[in-house]
Image: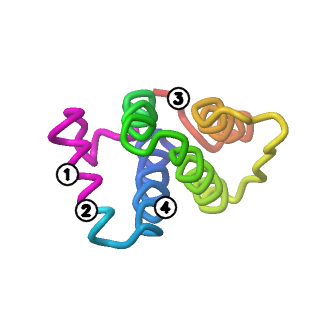
Amino acid sequence: MPQKEFNKFLLAAVEESLSALGDSSKEAIFYHLETSFNLKKEGIPSNMNGFAKALERIFGPGADYLEKLIEQRLYAKLGLSLDQEHNDNFLSSLNAAKKQLLMAGECVAP
């Protein structure tokens, strides 16, 4: 799976997870990310660190819920098993998904 495809799955997982808050809320969050954090929706997969920081600034401790939801949806989309014990950090969990795909020969590093 090329990096571009991985990014599509990641963005889809983000969108689906934010939809859990309602479609109008999701759109408001994307607007806020763009206007307050200079982070366009299409740029989220290439700037997950900035996205995670923005979620924390917007939602405070509630960002953890969204991060776990994004992780779960991404892993499900990719057909991977999410190991919560070893991936307690959002960004390390996303990197672990990419690493699992690389080890399986399914993802091409950028």
Magenta range is: 28-45
Write down the residue under mark 1.
31
Q: Work out how far the residue at label 3 is from the one at label 2, CA to CA, in angstroms.
A: 31 Å
Type of amino acid at the residue the image marks with label 4: Ser
Q: Which numbered disc, 3 or 2, marks the residue that appears first in the sequence?
A: 2
Label 1 near label 2: C-beta < 8 Å? yes
Type of amino acid at the residue the image marks with label 1: Tyr
**Image quadrant where one finds the C terminus:** top left
- SS of the residue under disc 4: helix
Determine whether 94 is above or below 14 in the image.
above
Write down the residue under mark 4.
17
**Residue at 66% across, 41% down:** 97
**Residue at 38% across, 29% down:** 50
Label 4 near label 1: C-beta < 8 Å? no
Write down the residue under mark 2.
27
What x and y, as percent, mark residue 70? Answer: 55, 53
Write down the residue under mark 3.
109
Q: Work out how far the residue at label 2 is from the one at label 1, CA to CA, in angstroms.
A: 6 Å
Q: Which quarter of the picture shows residue 99?
A: top right
Type of amino acid at the residue the image marks with label 2: Glu
Q: Which numbered disc, 1 or 4, marks the residue that appears first in the sequence?
A: 4
Q: Residue furthest right?
A: 85
Q: Which numbered disc, 2 or 4, marks the residue that appears first in the sequence?
A: 4
Is residue 40 highlighted in magenta?
A: yes
